[in-house]
């Protein structure tokens, strides 16, 4: 109970700090057809606080599909204020985003995994000039839901060893003894398990497999990273692809950022806390509050505690980073990049996340992000 009260207190303090912060905002326009004259009342209200400054032109970006719903929501608000910027975020996956950034073809990238040392070194060659390098700015938090499609089963509990055995192919049917033990009151069918993973390089895959490696190392001995390396299973592209596969396939299960699981049923994870924890913006924020900043210099990459047993903390979480140059950004896109990042790190930008099934970044961390964004050059 003390842990539970502590987590609630952390969330409450974070919310108060965010709501009391100065709203620093930005501008843009939605290339998907949302216009600044849409008449949306919330967008119109946001427009009054957004500062366009010298932002103009087209802003190309790519990366994490997990955060694309958040980006779309931000750009909708964004475009109500500033008509001089067109933002095109492709959402082709974290691997594609980092590659595009390091090739210098996008102004910023989104990734659910922090840059590796070799990727930072590569960023110095083409993406960033004047001695600059790519840095990680945490902007979006979220739970990685395990969504499933099993007839007659609406409340499924799994733990880390069982999840690892499902995704490695060792547990093959939904009435397996290990699943029955965790769900004694459920009517589990003998349906074959159809485990889906991402076919593209994905930070969601990286975070999901980091969880398995940390929480149950005896049952998950496969190499981690953005590419799926375990044997078997079926593959689909992007967060929307695995979500659609689960929806259409009886017996299916897959991992995806929670905003893609809104129309699906998700697993509750038995972590050793007083009760199993379901994915939500609140339970993800509780877990991220336990993260540590491990980046150096202006880099703000985080280390997440995947083995948390705190009440109300969902263990399979991710943080999406916006990747930019600390200095040496292209002069023609820098004003728009700073304006957009300033907005999404603001009170107003972070406030949109929970409305779209994401988790705001804890107040002490997002404060550091705002300071870093203001100094980009």
Image: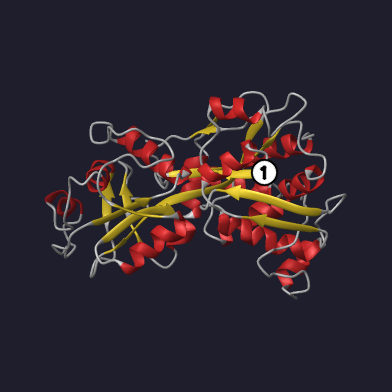
Please identify the quadrant where the C terminus is shown. Answer: top right
292 relative to 225 in the view: left or right: right
Residue at (54%, 35%) from the top-left corner?
114
Q: Which one is in front, 118 or 185?
A: 118
Residue at (32%, 43%) from the top-left corner?
271
Image position, residue 30 (x, y; %): 70, 63
Image position, residue 82 (x, y; %): 81, 60
Please identify the quadrant where the N terminus is shown. Answer: top left
For mark 1, what is the residue? 105
15 relative to 372 in the view: left or right: left
- Regarding residue 13, the answer to whether it shows in the image is no
- Regarding residue 45, the answer to whether it shows in the image is yes
Using the image, determine if residue 168 lies above or below residue 291.
Answer: below
Image position, residue 128 (x, y; %): 71, 32
Q: Within the image, what quadrant is residue 119 found in? A: top right
- Helix, strand, or loop for circle 1? loop
Q: Which one is in front, 21 or 307?
A: 307
Image position, residue 329 (x, y; %): 76, 36
Q: Within the image, what quadrant is residue 34 found in? A: bottom right
Residue at (74%, 35%) from the top-left corner?
371
According to the image, what is the colour scheme of the structure?
A: secondary structure
Q: Within the image, what quadrant is residue 298 found in? A: top right
Residue at (75%, 31%) from the top-left corner?
327
Circle 1 packing at 10 Å, graded few (<14), some (14-19), many (20+), is: some
Q: Which one is in front, 26 or 198?
A: 198
């Amino acid at each position: 109970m003390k842990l539970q009260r502590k987590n609630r207190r952390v969330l409450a303090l974070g919310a108060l700090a965010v709501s009391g912060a100065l709203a620093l905002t930005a501008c843009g326009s939605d290339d998907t057809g949302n216009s600044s004259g849409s008449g949306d009342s919330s967008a119109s209200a946001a427009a009054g606080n957004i500062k366009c400054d010298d932002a103009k032109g087209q802003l190309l970006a790519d990366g994490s599909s997990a955060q694309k719903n958040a980006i779309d929501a931000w750009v909708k608000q964004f475009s109500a204020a500033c008509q001089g910027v067109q933002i095109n975020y492709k959402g082709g996956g974290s691997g594609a985003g980092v590659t595009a950034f390091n090739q210098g073809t996008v102004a910023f990238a989104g990734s659910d995994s922090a840059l590796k040392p070799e990727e930072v070194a590569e960023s110095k060659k083409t993406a960033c000039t004047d001695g600059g390098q790519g840095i990680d700015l945490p902007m979006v938090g979220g739970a990685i839901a395990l969504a499933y499609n099993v007839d007659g089963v609406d409340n499924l509990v799994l733990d880390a060893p069982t999840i690892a055995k499902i995704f490695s192919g060792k547990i093959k049917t939904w009435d397996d003894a290990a699943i029955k033990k965790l769900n004694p009151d459920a009517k589990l069918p003998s349906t074959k398990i159809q485990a889906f993973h991402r076919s593209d390089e994905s930070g969601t895959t990286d975070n999901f497999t980091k969880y398995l490696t940390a929480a149950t190392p005896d049952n998950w001995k496969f190499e981690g990273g953005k590419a799926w390396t375990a044997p078997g299973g079926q593959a689909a592209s992007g967060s929307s692809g695995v979500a659609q596969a689960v929806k259409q396939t009886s017996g299916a299960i897959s991992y995806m950022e929670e905003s893609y699981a809104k129309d699906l049923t998700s697993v509750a994870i038995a972590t050793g806390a007083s009760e199993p924890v379901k994915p939500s913006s609140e339970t993800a924020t509780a877990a991220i509050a336990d993260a540590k900043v491990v980046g150096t210099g202006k880099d703000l990459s985080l280390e997440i505690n995947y083995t948390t047993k705190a009440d109300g903390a969902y263990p399979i979480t991710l943080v999406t980073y916006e990747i930019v140059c600390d200095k040496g950004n292209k002069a023609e896109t820098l004003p728009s990049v700073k304006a957009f990042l300033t907005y999404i790190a603001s009170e107003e930008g972070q406030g949109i996340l929970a409305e779209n099934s994401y988790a705001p970044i804890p107040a002490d961390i997002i404060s550091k992000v705002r300071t870093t964004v203001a100094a980009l050059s």
